[in-house]
Image (cartoon, helix red, strand yellow):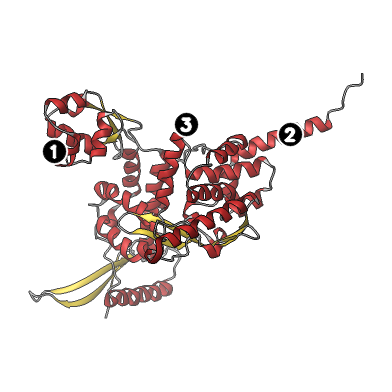
Amino acid sequence: MATITKRGKSYLISISCGYDDAGKQIRKTMTWKPESSMTVRQEKKAVKAAAVRFEDQVQSGQYIDPSITLSQFIDKWLTDYAEVSLRADTIAGYKANIPTIKAALGHLKLCKIQPQHIIEFYKNLSENGVRRDTKYQCTIDLQKILKENNILKKDAQAVFGISYATLFQAVKGRNISKASAESICRALKISMEKSFKPVGKDKLSGNTILHYHNLLKSIFSTAVHWQVLVYSPVDRVKAPKKEYVEQECLTAEEAQKLVCLLDGEPENRKAATLIALCSGMRRSELYALKWDSIDIDTCTVSICKTAVYVAKQGIVNGDTKNKKSTRVIKLPSCCQRVLLEYRAWYNEQRLACGDQWHDSNRLFVTWNGEPESPENFTTWFRTFRRKNNLSEGLHPHSLRHTNATLQIGAHQDIKTVSSRLGHSQTSTTLNVYAHAIQEADATAADVLNGLLTPSKKA
């Protein structure tokens, strides 16, 4: 049974958990503080209820000592909350950021972390040299040095511990990772500072720091929900300012050119690109489509699932991003011919594969019918973009942005645009495409000016 001891304005609740091997009694304790507005009677009743809850948590193994370190709590949060409640790609993104949080704050006790710790962490993230993904470019004649040392590129793995492709990139003066550059310098016994230079941004963007803020917010709010903490220190810290990044997209003329450039490309890539452009769906939604999702006769598509690639897990299938992302939209009639041609090509591949074919019913598959990773489409699109001298900022998600801006430019109402894109709220559409909306508004103003301005009589 719990023991309740009053200590000033708070109470110490203690539970006996038996004895250890040395015969020492094991006790779990927690401090409970009443609300200032409580009467004496309410206070006594509330502390008894808190003691009962605490005892239940201890006996069921659900109690978490608030004096554990943040690093220990994050591990608990990952297994008991994140991996149960969050999407696989969200978890993968969080896991990429967790090592940085653990390195900076992980050693601190969970109950001792204050808003100032969080503020200092954000300040540190904004400093130069924090990025772990900064690329490096070779500034010396690496080809000459390799020749002088009788090292062939094919021996890259044995000599440097890196792939042939990475060494080839370094020799050509292209960007490689810091770890690869250090491996080359270590093997050749040359100075990193004199042989390679960092390229691109050397510090994290405000949006990336905001990702860290959202992760910490989730971790600490869970601690509060589990009654491990009374309040979250993150809630008392101003969120980093989100930076506006104008999304790359195509004009109507550029989109038409892109469609023309697809002639001669593989049927699966042509179909994927056109469906993405004409529907505005997310890449994860596109690669979760099944043939059952497409009605070629009516040219409609049902979007109800997602497929993402997660390192060490492969393709992970899940639900759509939000309730409104589950939707049925109509494709332009030009997609009908493309889908018919693609279905004929698809069936040819299936028949040619014979008994090696795995019937997944997915719209986009590998050579033997297995679901294809969305990453393959991104890799192809990058090659396609470079081959046709398209903008370096153009990527598969640009097709979604192009779809939205073309609709807005054609004066489609925001509610319809938002519904087709699968945004949870129209405010999301208004925020993301504010620039396109302003341009459409300016065009509308010009049209009104032409209509309402009286013509001068001759």
Q: Is residue 363 visible?
A: no
**What kind of residue is marked 3?**
Asn
Q: Position of residue 418 (x, y in %)?
A: 61, 51
- Residue 184, compared with residue 298, is above or below; it is above
* Residue 371 lies in quadrant: bottom left
Q: Name which residue lies at 46% across and 54% down.
A: 284
Q: Earlier in the sequence, mark 3 or mark 1?
A: 1
Q: Quadrant of residue 299?
A: bottom right
Looking at the rendered structure, the secondary structure element under dot 3 is loop
- State left or right for residue 78 relative to residue 429: left
Residue 367 in the image, given as x and y percentages of width and height: 40, 56
The residue type indicated by label 1 comes to Val
| Amino acid identity at mark 2 | Ala
Crowding at mark 3 (Cα within 10 Å: few <14, some 14-19, many 20+)? few
Q: Observer-nearest residue: 197 or 10?
A: 197
Query: Which mark identifies residue 414?
Result: none
Asked which secondary structure carries label 2, the reply is: helix
**Camera-side residue of 455 and 269:** 269
Circle 1 is placed at which residue position? 159
Which residue extends farthest top? 458
Q: Is residue 331 left or right of residue 51?
A: right
Q: Which residue does the numbered mark 3 point to in the structure image?
A: 389
| Within-10-Å neighbours for mark 2: few <14, some 14–19, many 20+ | few
